[in-house]
Image (cartoon, helix red, strand yellow):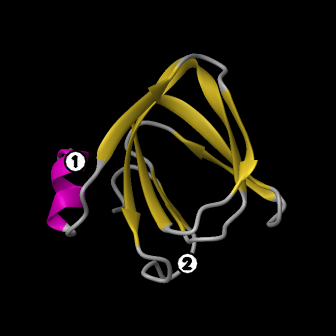
Amino acid sequence: MIDPEARLRAEGLSPGAWSNGPNDRYGAHEHGYDKVLVCVSGSIRFGLPELGRSVDLDVGHRLDLPAGTRHDAVVGALGVTCLEAHLPAGQLGGMAHRPAGTW
């Protein structure tokens, strides 16, 4: 598997890392910028209330979230570490969940 940070940097992104403990939660919110997330350990579930669905990120999975996409999150039982990069609003073509090995 290609190093996810190197892969994001090859796309011109500048990722940073963050971590949360088991079962931590984020309430529904949105951002004024596009966001690219890659799970590098553990897992996290992103709820997309306005779309009526959720997306599970496991190791190697990527989620592209356009600006203004309302989302919440629940961290898995083992905690999570993600890489995250920001882009100006409108740079992403749309929301996309890409499982490991597909991006």
- At label 1, counting other C-alpha atoms closer than 10 Å, the crowd grade (few under 14, some 14-19, many 20 or more) is some
State the residue position of label 1. 5
78 sits left or right of 48 in the view: left
User: Residue 10's image quarter?
Assistant: bottom left
Vertical side of 51 occupied by 26: above or below: above
| Residue for badge 2 | 94
Mark 2: few, some, or many residues within 10 Å (few <14, many ≥20)?
Answer: few
Work out whether mark 2 precedes mark 1 in sequence or the reverse, and give the earlier one.
1
**Does residue 99 appear to the left or right of 53 in the view shown?**
left
75 sits left or right of 88 in the view = right
Which range is magenta?
A: 3-10
Residue 41, can we see it? Answer: no
Q: Is residue 79 above or below residue 5?
A: above
Q: Position of residue 53 (x, y in %)?
A: 78, 57
Q: Is residue 13 magenta?
A: no
Residue sitting at 65 percent across and 23 percent down?
A: 24
